[in-house]
């Protein structure tokens, strides 16, 4: 991923880390259940079944955490790829990911507290939502990043899938 991100992978969970002056940004995602189900399994009229094979693309939900130096709070933005936006290149300036929820969590706590207020962006003023998207873009989380995250996640998912099949083969073969 371009932009000076460091990658850490632990099984199916990946973490991208980036430091900018005064802040640390972490993006976390898990590849499990990140490939959307096929819309229709039947080939279109006039198409052979093998021509119908879509590329399996991993589009995981991801969490962006922004920690400012000298604060005890972390801004947490829960993001996802809306199904209708994936692969739609037609619209200019359209975001390929959206922010679903925003909250503050105590810095350094591994478990987030359900007692902290979480704002669902469905009820958020559009101008404030745009400011949050700009806030993310200023920190390197923009459409280019989101495209690269899809590529990275897809590669990791395929790698884990192959490993799973090899493990399954060994397990079943071993009697």
Image (spheres, grey):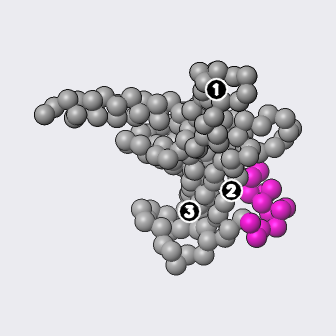
**Magenta stretch contains residue 119:** no
**Which residue is found at the position 77% from the left and 37% from the top?**
88
Observer able to see residue 17: no
**First in sequence: mark 2 vs mark 3:** 3
Q: Is the Cβ of the residue at disc 1 closer than 8 Å to that at disc 3?
A: no
Q: Quadrant of residue 102?
A: bottom right
Label 2: which residue?
99
**First in sequence: mark 1 vs mark 3:** 1
Residue 6 image offset from top left, x and y in percent: 50, 37
Principal SS element in the magenta part? helix
Mark 3 secondary-structure assignment: strand
Residue 97 image offset from top left, x and y in percent: 69, 47
Mark 1 secondary-structure assignment: helix
**Magenta stretch contains residue 127:** yes
Residue 122 image offset from top left, x and y in percent: 74, 66
Label 3: which residue?
74
Label 1: which residue?
52
**First to last magenta residue range:** 122-136
Q: CA distance from mark 1 to mark 3?
A: 45 Å
Q: CA distance from mark 2 to mark 1?
A: 32 Å
Residue 18 falls left or right of residue 170: right
Q: Residue furthest bottom?
A: 115
């Amino acid at each position: 991923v371009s932009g000076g991100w460091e990658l850490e992978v632990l099984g199916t969970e990946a973490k991208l880390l980036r430091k900018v002056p005064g802040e640390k940004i972490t993006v976390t995602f898990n590849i499990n259940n990140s490939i959307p189900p096929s819309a229709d399994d039947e080939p279109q009229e006039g198409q052979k079944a093998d021509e119908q094979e879509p590329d399996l693309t991993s589009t995981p939900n991801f969490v962006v955490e922004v920690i400012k130096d000298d604060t005890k709070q972390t801004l947490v933005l829960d993001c996802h790829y809306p199904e209708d936006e994936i692969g739609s290149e037609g619209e200019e300036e359209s975001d390929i990911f959206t922010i679903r929820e925003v909250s503050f969590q105590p810095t350094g706590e591994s478990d987030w507290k359900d007692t902290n207020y979480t704002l669902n962006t469905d009820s958020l003023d559009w101008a404030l939502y745009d400011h949050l998207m700009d806030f993310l873009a200023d920190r390197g989380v923009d459409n280019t990043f989101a495209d690269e995250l899809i590529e990275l996640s897809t590669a990791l998912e395929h790698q884990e899938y192959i490993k799973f099949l090899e493990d399954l083969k060994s397990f079943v073969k071993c009697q």
